[in-house]
Image (cartoon, rainbow, N blue to C red):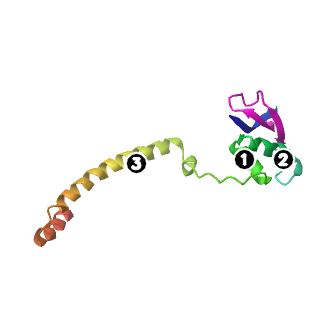
Amino acid sequence: MLKLRLSRGGTKKRPVYKVVVADSRFARDGRFIEKVGFFNPLLPKDKKERVGLEAERIKYWLGQGAKPTTRVARILGENELMPMPVNGNNPNKAIPKKERNKKEEDKTEAPKADAAPAAEAPKEEAPKADAAPAAEAPKEEKK
């Protein structure tokens, strides 16, 4: 499967990326088919030199079935080469992992506790054919 993705270059703590077309099985910084642009995240967003793309080649590879990664899709969207991708929504990412696990355990325990009373409630409601037992049933539940 072909991917449009970033290949890291530069030195330690000074990254510069190439936008490349590569097979998804190849290493991130390894073999690629064609270089179609560059991305320098260290420059301010308003600088022209931050991103350089070969629009015609990118459109060609998208037509051939290459799928951009999320970051490349965003770069292409900002440069109007494809529609801007929808922002993801992962509200759990802001919560520390230990607390997330506790919440998941609570959620799994809560349906089990809710399932038992829910099963009992229809059993109580089913035999209510007369008006008098129906009036007495709510009083018993309140106790």
Residue 143 placement: quadrant: bottom left
At label 1, counting other C-alpha atoms closer than 10 Å, the crowd grade (few under 14, some 14-19, many 20 or more) is: some
Q: Position of residue 71 (x, y in %)?
A: 71, 45
Residue ID for mark 3 = 107
Q: Secondary structure at mark 3?
A: helix
The Cα atoms of the two marked residues, 3 and 1, are separated by: 35 Å
Q: Nearer the viewer, mark 3 or mark 1?
A: 1
Q: Is residue 51 visible?
A: no
Q: Are marks 3 and 2 in contact (CB under 8 Å)?
A: no
Q: Position of residue 68 (x, y in %)?
A: 71, 42
Question: Where 139 sits versus 55, above or below?
Answer: below
- Is residue 128 rendered to the left or right of residue 77? left
Residue type pointed to by label 3 = Lys
The numbered dot on residue 73 is 1
The Cα atoms of the two marked residues, 3 and 2, are separated by: 48 Å
Disc tally is 3
The Cα atoms of the two marked residues, 1 and 2, are separated by: 13 Å
50 vs 79, nearest the viewer = 79
Residue type pointed to by label 2 = Ala
- Is residue 24 rendered to the left or right of residue 91? right
Q: Secondary structure at mark 1?
A: helix
Residue ID for mark 2 = 55
The numbered dot on residue 52 is none
- Is residue 134 rendered to the left or right of residue 8? left
Mark toward the start of the polypeptide (3 vs 1): 1
Q: Which residues are magenta?
A: 13-40
At label 3, counting other C-alpha atoms closer than 10 Å, the crowd grade (few under 14, some 14-19, many 20 or more) is: few
Residue 127 placement: quadrant: bottom left
> In the image, what residue occupies the spot 11% across and 68% down?
133
Residue at the farthest front position: 64
> In the image, what residue occupies the spot 15% across and 71% down?
135
Q: Position of residue 48 (x, y in %)?
A: 88, 51
